[in-house]
Image (cartoon, rainbow, N blue to C red):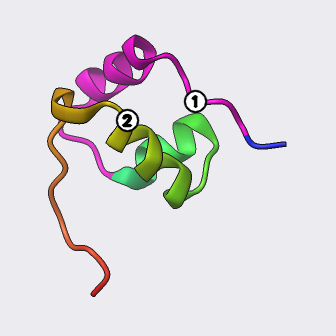
Amino acid sequence: MPKPPPKPPELLDVIRRYEPVEAKVLQSHFGVSQPTLSRWLKALGDSVCQMGRTRG
């Protein structure tokens, strides 16, 4: 069963606490995979800014 996403305020609180934060830190904190974290961040929309390399 997939892990349910945290409520947006909870995810935003963690991001703000560690700002800026690497994806690996968030993955470890929530115990999720990179694709799951990417979906959660995408769901936050303009509330977060994602920077870094992507797969080409």
The picture quadrant where one finds residue 18 is top left
Quarter of the image where one finds residue 8: top left
Horizontal side of residue 40 vs 50, given as left or right: right
x 21%, y 73%: residue: 53
| Residue name at image x 54 percent, y 36 percent | 29
Q: Is disc 2 surrounded by few (<14), some (14 to 19) or many (20+) residues within 10 Å?
A: few
The disc placed on residue 13 is none
The residue shown at (34%, 43%) is 42
In the depicted structure, whether residue 7 falls above or below residue 54: above
Horizontal side of 32 relative to 40 (left or right) equals right
Spatial CA span between label 1 and label 2: 10 Å
Q: Where does label 1 land, which residue?
A: 5
Residue 17 among those drawn in magenta: yes
Q: Earlier in the sequence, mark 1 or mark 2?
A: 1
Image coordinates for residue 10, horizontal then vertical, percent = 44, 15
Q: Where is residue 6 in the image (x, y as percent from the top left)?
A: 54, 23
Camera-side mark, 1 or 2: 2
Instruction: Tell me if residue 31 comes above or below residue 47 in the rendering.
Output: below
**Is 43 a magenta residue?**
no
Q: State the extent of the magenta-drawn residues as a range.
A: 3-22
Estimate the x, y position of residue 31 in percent, counting from the top left.
64, 42
Element at label 1: loop
Type of residue at label 1?
Answer: Pro
Q: Residue at x 38, y 12 (%)?
A: 9
Q: Which amino acid does label 2 sit on?
A: Ala
